[in-house]
Image (cartoon, rainbow, N blue to C red):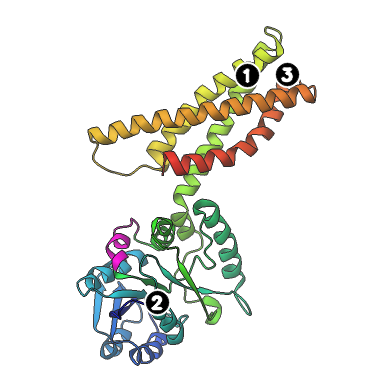
Amino acid sequence: MEQPARPVTILIPAYNPDEKLLVLLPKLRERFDRIVLVDDGSTAGRDIFPKAAPYVEKILVHEKNRGKGAALKTGFSYIAESGSDVITADADGQHTPEDIAKVAEGLKTQRGGLVLGVRAFTGKVPFRSRFGNTWTRWLFFFMTRLMINDTQTGLRGIPFELLAHIAAIPGDRYEYEMAMLADARNHDQKPLQIPIETIYIEENATSHFNPILDTIRVYRSLFQFCLSSVLSFLLDNAVFAAVVWYLADRAPRRADVLVALVTARLVSSNFNFFYNHFVVFYRRRKLTKMRMQRGVRHYFQYWGLVLALAAASYALTSLCAALFDVRGVAITVVKIVVETFLFLASYFLQKRFIFK
């Protein structure tokens, strides 16, 4: 049901803008009364801001460049006092006034979730943008179970009801925008995705997104989680192989697999838990009794999962080893194949119930 009309503010973070911003602003002004511009410590294009002033309600200034996430938060803080919905748009002319108006229309019915302007990536699209969006879309789905057709879109409608919550999400640069999307899985409504025009000006040459540094920032926790998994995987299989080799002529065949599996899992699982707890999902917060109790609870939850997966690993490894008559250190190969399938189950259960 369409809600009563409420004010909408267009928020545009700008870093080193050019004339394209001055082309956009008059057209936006014809449709929207409130436009807020954030100068994120620009070192070039400084003459653009005085020319933009007649078309905007306010120009907020960062003395030094702090990143797009910080610029958005500065704008959110200013707009929050007005009780207005917010639409974020880019300063480089890739979002048309017509598409911004479509997002504003979507906000009339979408009160418990984001409204996203999503590109179809058809026609002449720079390869890095097409490729980046494709793999990011599927990786994001794997991480959150949300299928967002354009994870890199800067055109986003935010209902006032969600503004304070979204402004509190950690991050100051491009990783903040991805964190905002990931947080959408906790909203009352899934993101409303509105098709918009796909525009790339000068092969997207004016984009300030650094493909290497900003990708690392966006996926830092994922990279750390993968590193944790790889190190645990190598440690687990090294210990397993060593114990199987030692027990090859000293214990019955099924016993050597069981002892090796238990020993390897004890070592690698403790390493994995503490790495995830203190590195991957670590937040610099004051240590309290409640957080200590929560950490202990997480530890036992983690070990419950470890035992369940270990039982499945043992059963499947032993079954496959017997079925194919695999002996000695070669059983390690069987174990690797089995646990490749168990890895996905482990990841989703840890993410959803332990380290959520």
Amino acid type, label 3: Gly
Q: Earlier in the sequence, mark 3 or mark 1?
A: 1
Residue matched to label 3: 328
Looking at the image, which residue sits at the far right?
Answer: 324
**Residue 115 screen position, x and y as percent:** 42, 71
Q: Which mark is residue 242?
A: 1
Type of secondary structure dominating the magenta stretch: helix
Residue at x 45% of width, y 60% of height: 214
C-alpha separation, residue under disc 2 versus residue under disc 1:
57 Å
**Nearest-to-viewer mark from 2 and 1:** 2
Q: Earlier in the sequence, mark 3 or mark 2?
A: 2
**Residue 227 screen position, x and y as percent:** 52, 41
Q: Is residue 49 visible?
A: yes
In the foreground, 135 or 185: 185
**Residue 155 screen position, x and y as percent:** 43, 74
**Nearest-to-viewer mark from 3 and 1:** 3
C-alpha separation, residue under disc 3 versus residue under disc 2:
61 Å
